[in-house]
Amino acid sequence: MPRLSEVIAALEKLWPAERSESWDAVGTVVGEPDQQVSRVLFAVDPVQETVDEAVRLGADLLVTHHPLYLRGTTTVAASTFKGRVVHTLIKNDIALHVAHTNADTADPGVSDALAGALDLRVVGPLVPDPTDPTGRRGLGRVCALDHPVTVRELADRAAAALPATAQGIRVAGDADAVVRTVAVSGGSGDSLFGQVRAAGVDAFLTADLRHHPASEARAHPSSTPLALLDAAHWATEWPWCELAAAQLDEISDRHGWDLRVHVSTTVTDPWTSHTPSPGAPN
């Protein structure tokens, strides 16, 4: 079995910490470098539900996309939500490692996994990383469909391919419009409308779209109307867990490690139900 430091070194090659945003908090949060690792769990959120899942599984390492402490803290008391997470991890000898914006822009990264879940062909990054000579790294992805579909069909595909959530898929635009090209961005994407417009795509699939940015994007004077597909934040990032687990499995096989890798299916989207308005459009 490998030591934690060896597994972390392999993960850092996939998602180097130096490629994270300056405001981000990535890397190892909890863990003894010399502890042995036999079982790893990937999840989106380092919340109590996924930590408890790691305990039940007997995992030695929990790898999450979202940070536990994105901002500074003065306490890890077990009486606090995040402090209880830390206490549970330490008591059960479970390490926690975070890959956030460094996984967003990786090749392959979060948006590659999202595109793959929807069977979209990646053409290139939506926001290229200027430090990447290959031009493959960056935020978001511009994708093509092998066969045109309608906006409604694309929304149905997303709803079927992504994990089920109370929100499902919200759509802005003509449901019968034809889609040949799509921009995707796992997680919150309404800061990327300028790049989406510049890409000239027919639709944009992301999460956390707010009223004003979405309204302005729809009203933008353009010869190409832009359809918006808004999924749950957690659902758009969950496919990365499967991608990351497969990457670690490959590394484990290459090194001859006795490592078992799992993906959490615990739904940690905060919204638990949805009641449509009477007479609301389908």
Image (cartoon, grey):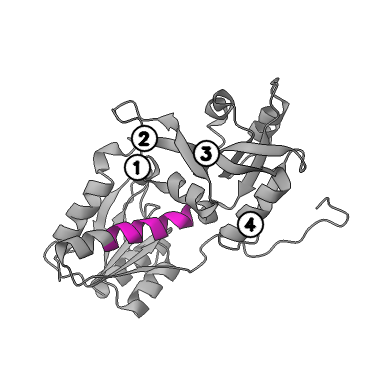
Horizontal side of 57 relative to 191 (left or right) equals left
Which residues, given as a range, are shown in magenta? 237-249
Asked whether 1 or 223 is in front, the reply is 223
Q: CA distance from mark 3 to mark 2?
A: 13 Å
Q: CA distance from mark 1 to mark 2?
A: 6 Å
Q: Are marks 3 and 1 in contact (CB under 8 Å)?
A: no
Horizontal side of 235 relative to 203 (left or right) equals left
- Residue receiving disc 3: 143
Mark 2 residue type? Arg
Residue placed at 56% from the left, 30% from the top?
196
Specify which label sits upstream in the sequence, 3 or 1.
Answer: 1
Mark 1 residue type? Asp
Q: Select label 2 or label 4 by which is in front.
A: 2
- Residue receiving disc 2: 136
Residue placed at 76% from the left, 43% from the top?
175
Is residue 209 visible in the rendered structure shown here?
Answer: yes
Q: CA distance from mark 3 to mark 1?
A: 15 Å
Would you call the spot at circle 3 few (<14 residues within 10 Å), some (14-19), or many (20 or more)?
A: many
Circle number at residue 159: 4
Q: SS class of the residue under badge 1?
A: loop
Q: SS class of the residue under badge 4?
A: helix
